[in-house]
Image: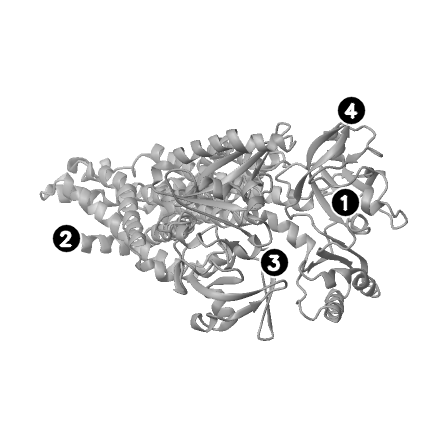
Amino acid sequence: MFNNYLKIAVRNLLRNKVYSAINILGLAIGIASCILIFLYVQDELSYENHFSKSGRITRIVGEVIFEGHKDEFAVTPPALAPAVSRFSDIEAVTQFNRAGKQTIWYNNQTFTDEDLVFADSVFFKVFDYELLAGNPATALIAPHTIVLTEEMAEKIFGGVEQAMGEVLQFSRDSYTVTGVYRNLGHSHLNVSGLLSKATIDARTSAEERNTQWFNLNNYTYVLLQNEEQIASLQAQVDDLTQNHVNPWIKENKLNAQMKFIVQPLKDIHFDTRYMHSISSSGNISYVYIFGAVAVFLLLIASINYMNLATARSAKRAKEVGLRKVVGADRSQIIRQFLGESVLLTLIAVLLALALVQIFIPSFNNLTEKNFSSDFFLQWDFLLVILAIVLLVGVVAGSYPAFFLSGFKPADVLKSDKQPRGGSATLRRALVVLQFSISLIMIIGTIVVFTQMHFLKSADLGFNKEQVMVIDVPGGDSTLVQRLPVIKQKLLQNPNVLQVSNSYSIPAEPTNRTLLLMEQDGKMVEKTMDIIAVDYDFISLMGMEIKEGRNFSRDMKTDEKSGIIINEAAAKWLGWSEPIGKKVGTGENRVGDSSTRIIGVVKDFHMSSLHTDVQPLAITLAPESPGYLLARISPENQAATISFVEEQWRMFDQRHPMEYFFMDEFFDRQYRAEEKMLTVFGYFAGLTILIACLGLFGLASFTAEQRTKEIGIRKVLGSTTGNIVLLLSKDFALLVAIAIMLATPVAWYGMSQWLQDFAYRIDLSWWIFALAGLLALVIALATVSFQAVKAALLDPVKAIRTQ
């Protein structure tokens, strides 16, 4: 019986080569896209899974509330860890903090790394990394020790065993390698090595570390005894905050309140709320979007099968009738057609796997992942493939199977009772659904593209073009002192137009500081973002002074008593005449009693256009470490960069010159949106392609079904244009209905997406009109090919068609 079913299925596929090819190709493209998106979604959802204790690990984050304004931080005070370690149900508490960018020397080789952290000796008790060498219980106890990842050990020493006991020289200290661990799986803790926290703890007293509640610079993680104790930990943390932390803040005359939040480890990767996170976060919205795209593609491909199978049911009507006459019951016929559907889906899956193998390198570049064909042998992937075969095969083939099996022998064997190819209404509804989905994808692509263009062309309040940014190592005080001389040397090149240095640059997190600001005749506490720059920073960046003046070398008092604020700060403070306002002194405040506002700069964006411009204070620090900025001419750019590198080597042979361009660095904040734009573009094209394959098949079927009618119309005088219009107008109407259905759905979805941006485009009518016109033109071009072919057919041959 099975062999007979298989033989008939293969014969049917070969007999209808065009329709079989359309179905298989459409399904293959849909399934291949679904597989690739499945890999991406699975990868994003796999963060922290490799830790055996991941369900019991939590991170504590902080909120600081000042004058009704809430700032959320991933970092917490150093005093939090010892306080939490005394709670009940706690198995371990670990704390670590960033080491910043470090230059490392070993055997006359120089390495730079910005993914190192200072970790305490409890780190490996909470995070069970596999140590390839060293003892996890003791590796980080002693000061000046370091534990490296396997990748770093290979990079610096050539192997794990070679690394043990070796000494690495840093700018300030030297560290002995006491361990190497294997960094498996995805984690937000994307660090390249662990420096012993005992090294920096030795520079402060234990009393200071255990009592300081307003110095946010440590990441705090807690290992619970079981997963159900998260609520209990939160309650204990709230009690600590209410009874100890906030009273301490009040005693120290800090007009703020603090709150700590317990966050499960697995929630961290997709949480973008907290400033100073140890690594960039994922976006759960994009996981949902890509998952929906995968479902859409598979749905469109399945609709193609259902449409074409039911449309061509008349061709198999006599086969069904004869089978029933010779004794086949309905269940056998259903199994026959479902079997054909599953076979066709299986062939499509094999083709899809081949397509995945071909396009996976491009997909890796697109998603910045590292997928390989090894996943073909993973049991969860095999289950997904099996589910796709069964789901698509059964669901897509179910309606044709039940429809065809319902034919009555007496009707289908009579020449005047031939079925008309299934429900035309259902087919039209499915075409409308296909093009509605395609239109949503097209509209989404246009909106994302338009928003990205707006983001990159918006007035940022400064000129980011042609600004070369050189990293200045902070640990080398001699180099920092040489900055004025380096700047003078660089300006000797006519292609170096301006030079400046600053501690912070746009697109980099700023420091938030408590200041005493003059308001209504008295000094009040305010928290404000603050950056330190030199005399030339504002000019080099093309910023505009709206009131007052810029920092001046002729004003010797500017370095100690001059501050510039932005318009947002003046507005926030309620200053109509900000020039001359006092910025007072106090513990942990900037400035002294003579500090004054000397200028107001036009608002500029220190961060992406996701957020509003924040109040900002700018202080003068001509020799601060951080960055050296050079605005260079676009002419002879390569030669200019070589000149800058040569001058750098003259002053610093120890540190390699690391540089980037401001425009690339700033636009990097929109990497997730650029990735989404590319994905939307590719998959919007695929949805249209699959929908057009089905439309091509249906147009071909329609033309074939109306061959005699076309012949008679031509005999009666209809032109080729009349025939093409006749066959195309029905499909044009379906696309028009799809436009009406897709527009409100796409408008709502993209409106929600645009809410992530403080500065965004308006959803203008032309976006939806362009998408609709594009879909209509593509659909008519697809249909017209078959319509023209049918219209050019010889009328005599057409009328003779059986």
Q: Is label 2 in contact with label 3 (beta carbons under 8 Å)?
A: no
Occupied quadrant, residue 307: top left
Which residue is at 62% across, 27% downward? 68
The label on residue 619 is 1
Q: CA distance from mark 4 to mark 1?
A: 23 Å
Locate residue 712 relative to residue 612 in the image: left or right: left
The label on residue 2 is 2
Q: Secondary structure at mark 3?
A: loop
Marks 4 and 2, the one that precedes in the sequence: 2
Q: Secondary structure at mark 2?
A: helix
**Which residue is at the far left?**
327
Q: Which residue is mark 4?
A: 520
- Amino acid type of disc 3? Lys
Q: Secondary structure at mark 4?
A: loop
- Amino acid type of disc 1? Thr
Marks 2 and 3, the one that precedes in the sequence: 2
Q: CA distance from mark 4 to mark 2?
A: 91 Å
The label on residue 101 is 3
- Res. 783 visible in picture: no
Marks 3 and 4, the one that precedes in the sequence: 3
**Residue 762: where, in percent of width, then height?**
62, 34
**Which residue is at the far right?**
554
Q: Is label 3 in contact with label 4 (beta carbons under 8 Å)?
A: no
Which residue is at 57% across, 54% downward? 202
- Residue placed most toward the observer, 757 or 392: 757
- Amino acid type of disc 4? Asp
- Amino acid type of disc 2? Phe
